[in-house]
Amino acid sequence: MMSQMPQQAAVPKCPSCEEPLEPGDRFCGACGYDLSVVPARPEDSPTLAVNGAVPAPDGVDWPVARDSDGHGRPAPVHAAAELPGTDSGGSPLPPPPEAPPATPVAPAASAPGVRFDRPDEPDEYPLQAPDPRLTAEQDATAQDAAAPAPAAHAEPAATEKVCVACRAGRVDDDGYCENCGHAQPRERDHMEQESGPIAAVSDRGLRHHRNEDAFSVGCTALPDGAPASVAIVCDGVSSATRPDDASLAASRAAGESLLGALPRGTHPQQAMHDAILAASHAVNALADEPATAREQAPHQNAPACTLVGAVVTAGLLVVGWVGDSRVYWVPADRSTPPARLTEDDSWAAQMVAAGLMNEAEAYADERAHAITGWLGADAYELEPHTASFKPDRPGLVVVCTDGLWNYAESAEEMADAVPLDAAARPLHGARVLVGHALDGGGHDNVTVALLPFPAPPQGAGSA
């Protein structure tokens, strides 16, 4: 007994996207449309217009329509009275009497579920027949709900990710569409978070294929009830294995450590030191995970990242770092000078500290960004840097990776890039700074967190 397989309709173009088809195609090569749902042409019925095109009967060679483009697309439709005709003897027909306006006629019924009036930008294309479902009555063994029966072209379940490109295909575990193959945006390509009076934004940039930066922001209170704001920013080392996982693990561990220690009365500078150690342990642990062994390449090192963070309380600013991410101080009164509060663990910084080069010469060297300190199992020796400051005026603390400060390296350049209302609108200010880096070329991942100083009263948020 022959199986009843759906027969492909003999159409020259896809009814969905009008892409030319090859003989024997079962699916459209451009959009994946199931051609088996297009009904075969009726044997004797009047011609149905599909998207405005009128297929010619087999064996008839129609001439090219007047005013057409010469490729089979006909001229605008005319009423019968507008076209010349002849009688059986070949004589011209007399002009017909003027007829009243024609009454609109409902379109001919088409096969169930098939649309012949395709809109300009359809959201989806229904199947020829509804997707069969097993109901509780049909399947007595179903516990709560019916299970969908197998279908040749079933749509993705509501809980599954749908491709952002074709809006039809399922997204596999690797982040690619099973229908059109389009790579899907990763969750970390662009991240934003606002927590009380502070905010952070991270972006993949314009050149990297993934975002290897991560951040953690939060607010808490000291034992006396005074508010405290915390921001941690981490930059994955691209030459290491799993740099994105390293930065994420470090930022989470450091943020959780600070938010747990400060309410217990730990001094903010000691809490920052302990948070960097906690982040180091979290990154070191990745080296023993099976995922690291699977991705390890001969030229790669263990997972690694840099870290920079800041704690703001009512009268104290504490910073901590390992690597070349930075903290800047931008006073609210822009007539007073800004300042950079961290020193890079980098080749360039070592050359300047040793007096072998000035800063301009060192950072112009191709070795400038080679880091000399990082978090990771293969770090030579972990030396957390911490420092405390007591600003005598209000201002803004900028915590960022080199993806930003490469485009605003000096404190003055960074202050010029910071919007004047950034302390009142930190999320907006962080977006502006990320945009500044992208406008400059976006050669690296870029992450920035903004903390106003002094810390606003507990419960205050950004405008």
Image (spheres, rainbow, N blue to C red):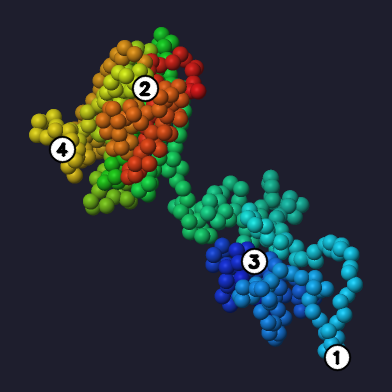
Q: Look at 38% across and 46% down and name the residue there.
A: 206
- Where residue 459 appears, as percent x and y from the top left, is 49, 17
Marks 2 and 1, how far apart at CA:
95 Å
**Where is mark 3, residue-wise?**
15
Question: Mark 3 and 4 residues: CB-CB less than 8 Å, in contact?
Answer: no
**Where is mark 4, residue-wise?**
361
Task: Please report whichever mark, 2 or 4, sits nearer to the chain's N-terminal start.
Answer: 4
Task: Please report whichever mark, 2 or 1, sits nearer to the chain's N-terminal start.
Answer: 1
Q: Look at 66% across and 79% down and name the residue there.
A: 64
Please state which of residues 354 and 231 is positioned toward the viewer in this rendering.
354
Question: Mark 2 and 1 residues: CB-CB less than 8 Å, in contact?
Answer: no
Instruction: Residue 444: name its quadrant.
Output: top left
Callout 1 amino acid? Gly
Callout 2 amino acid? Leu
Callout 3 amino acid? Pro
Relative side of 327 to 455, left or right: left
Task: Please report whichever mark, 1 or 4, sits nearer to the chain's N-terminal start.
Answer: 1
Relative side of 161 to 368, left or right: right
**Where is mark 2, residue-wise?**
396
Q: Is residue 198 above or below residue 206?
A: above
Q: In this view, does 385 lie above or below 315?
A: below
Task: Please report whichever mark, 3 or 2, sits nearer to the chain's N-terminal start.
Answer: 3
Please state which of residues 2 and 167 is positioned toward the viewer in this rendering.
167
Instruction: For marks 1 and 3, give the one nearer the viewer.
Output: 1
Marks 1 and 4, how far apart at CA:
98 Å
- Where residue 265 appears, as percent x and y from the top left, is 36, 13
Q: Can residue 160 be seen in this view?
A: yes
Instruction: For marks 3 and 4, give the one nearer the viewer.
Output: 4
Q: Residue 89 carries which label?
A: 1
